Amino acid sequence: MAPEGTIRHFPDVCAMSACLVTYATDCMYIPPQNQMWRVPVYEIVEARPLARGIKLFVIKAPRIAKKQKPGQFVIVRLDDCGERIPLTIADANPEAGTVTIVVQAIGKTTMLLSMLEAGDSILDVVGPLGKPSEIENFGTAVIVSGSVGTAMAYPTARELKRAGNKVISIVGARSKELMVLEDEVRVVSDETHVVTDDGSYGTKGLVTDKLKEVMAAGKVDYVLAVGPVPMMRAVARMTGPEKIKTIVSLNSIMVDGTGMCGGCRVLVNDSSQFACVDGPEFDATQVNFEVLMQRNNMYREQEKMSIDRLQADPEGELDRLRRKNHKHECAAEAVGVTNE
Amino acid sequence: MSDATQTKVTHNPLPNKERTKLPRQRVPEQDAKVRAHNFQEVNLGFPPEQAHEESLRCIECPKPGCVLKCPVSVDVRAVIDLILAEDYLGAAAKVREDNALPAITGRVCPVEDQCESGCVLGKKGEPVGIAYLERFVADWERESGQFGLPKSAPPTGKKVGIIGSGPAGLACAGDLIQMGHQVHVFEALHELGGVLVYGIPEFRLPKDIVRHEIDVLRRRGVEFETNVVVGKTVTVDELTNDEGFDALFIATGAGLPRFLNVPGEHFNGIYSANEFLTRVNLMRAYRFPEYDEPLYPCKDRDVIVVGGGNTAMDAVRSALRLGASNASIYYRRTEIEMPARVEEVHHAKDEGVHFEMLVNPVEFLGDEKGNLTSVRCIRMELGEPDDSGRRSPVPIKGSEFVAPCSVAIIAAGTSANPLIQSTTPGLATTKRGYISAKDDTLATSKPGVFAGGDIVTGGATVILAMGAGRKAAKSIDDYLKGLVQIAN
């Protein structure tokens, strides 16, 4: 046990609550003033709901803000029990040192993240990861996006416009309340088409229906599709036979995001590619979407279990996260560490 | 501190003849049947009495082979004498003069090929248990809550950046801070320690031990910054040009996992050893759902691990602890050729790991959902020796068989991660994509930039990486002093 007047070094909150692991050498006691040296947390400076279940976060991350380019992503870990998940960078402000991410609450981590507000913090944000989008003047560029995919496609659309392309955006969602960043997309597009599955907004139908019309109306030189896997596959099947350069951004499951683990491997042109370092953007006609879907379902049962745990006590989980991250923040301040 | 080493009056009362008659002390271990189901440490370490008994065995060779065989040249003889003098803190400080991470190397060093292989006693009987003694003094020091920090030189005003907080980076940091330089370590992951935290499992190296060793470095003044992927978050050139680093040491480790490139390798349940171990160790997936990171279930299922190195042993023993009904090593050569440490193989066998030698997977098979169900293998026989001197395995025609398995872990080595090489103009690489560094100085083709560890050599051991870190520290110090012209 700890000697009087000392505390356990580097408290691992989870370990302390559960005490599942005890060591033969139960030691590690050091004076309180040096109790933690973790780098500081990443502060959320703005949190704004965009649509039902979709929220925008502006996060202080100066190094990433300075370096990021359209098409790249960050990996976040909410707290010291958290998983690492990739999220596409939707925007950044290098002067303010912030990056913007748009999150759809579909798993435990994204649900918990979506409960956070301005002033809260995230324990780890790392990036920018992945290769940036290829930006050049292709001619006519069509950006096809579904729901939260619009946030990921938006920065690339903006840069394509800046590079001189004629940008046609096809923005889709299941219904009106899931539509995001439509106004932003309109600003950077020469033409914007809005499509909903249920017809509650814009044209009723699928983005591929609209793409077909656009392809029939004039020459298309480049297509970027970002959204659910079936949507990206459908786009690839339409544009592939027409020999139109088509790029998709793949959302495979990742851990480290630096090429170290290979968990995000996808079959591209029948060979294994790592979405984190070789992608996330790939030539759509070469991607094996079936394998992508299969691998994305790998942890379905565990994901459900985690969601159930969260939903059993969402406020409690949120409270725990806040308390833990606040502690890290205080400790970082105490030893004079900042992330700027 | 004892001055025994200077005066050559040792604390060993026994004549040499008596010493050699003493049997090697057996280190207490967790019972194999119990430990196969938990993640607690396997080796429990010497109590002081045993450390003392084992130290008595040293015959104090005038030219100690143990020191010669140690990649970081720990003064083993002096350490042992301090143990006999019961000055355990002094012994720990003595180790720390040459080895920044004694509690770690005392656990994971392949000593049978290093210090203990140089021990004279090993020629006729069993060598002195040097690693256990090293671990003993490091653990003693940590438990005491105090430690003798080696004295640092006066500040030089020079700033050195170290890329990667694994064994090479940490060893380099320890030496540089002692030389009086300012040291800033960048780590890509959220936790410090590199392979020590993502690769080596808790039951072989408790994470608290790693944290403690890193904390010692921090107390000595080393700065650490996590979540920085050099090559992405910031480039090597930006570090030297914009952030004012006078020298850099690249120690980013082995990198990309190799797969077998056989059909079906994308099925659910097939992992690289890197991913499997990262999920289990770094992300604590063995404590899901308390920790969020999931792992494809191993409980009550057949798990195979393809490979014969230490990583394969770590993976298969982890799988066993996760409740695998059968955990097997599939290796294409025989046990003699296996690169894993003898102790690890021995531990794995005791715990119930099944060894299938001279087999090689040729295809993975799955169900309609894409979940792995079995593996088709071919039996091998040993042919002529290859470049590595090992007899190369040759498939036996018509020997194919199918074995059921739900999880397959590929531990077939790694290749170079190109993140830094591809973003650093002027940094020369080898044919295989590793960073080119001079053997004697570890200088790269870029002035002021040094590289060492697995990113230069390809996958090796913790202590070799630490040796590279120390070598780099020395030549960085020389470079900063302007003593030698390393830049070319």
Image (spheres, grey):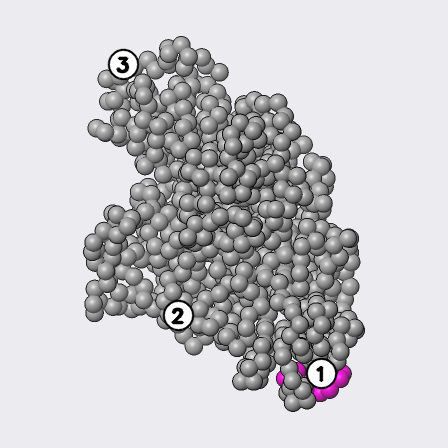
Magenta-drawn segment: A195-209
* Element under disc 1: strand
Disc 2 from disc 1: Cα separation: 38 Å
Question: In the picture provided, is B50 more to the left or to the right than A69?
Answer: left
Seen in the picture, residue B207 relative to B262 is either above or below; the reply is: above
Give the amino acid type for the residue marked by disc 2 in the picture: Gly
Residue B457, image x, y percentages: 42, 45
Q: Indicate the chain on which mark 1 is placed.
A: A
Q: Is residue B476 visible?
A: yes
Q: Which residue is mark 1?
A: A195
Q: Whole-Å distance between the Cαs marked 1 and 3?
A: 91 Å
Q: Nearer the viewer, mark 1 or mark 3?
A: 1
Q: Position of residue A165 (x, y in %)?
A: 70, 74
Name the mark on residue B15: 3
* Residue A244 drawn in magenta: no
Question: Which residue lies under the disc numbered 2?
Answer: B264
Gap in angstroms between the C-alphas marked 2 and 3? 64 Å
Q: Is residue B198 left or right of residue A200?
A: left
Q: In the rendered structure, are the residues bearing label 1 and label 3 in contact, judged by CB atoms less than 8 Å apart?
A: no
Q: Is residue A258 above or below residue B62?
A: below
Q: SS for tag 3?
A: loop
Q: Amino acid at mark 1?
A: Val
Determine whether label 2 and label 1 are within 8 Å by CB: no
Mark 3: which amino acid? Pro
Residue B165 drawn above or below residue A200: above
Q: Residues within 10 Å of mark 1 (few under 14, many from 20)?
A: many
Q: Quadrant of the C terminus of chain A?
A: top right
- Earlier-in-chain disc, 2 versus 3: 3
Query: Which residue is drawn at the image coordinates 56% and 80% (left, top)?
Result: A236
For disc 2, the chain is B
Q: Nearer the viewer, residue A334 or A181?
A: A181
Q: Are marks 1 and 3 on the same chain?
A: no
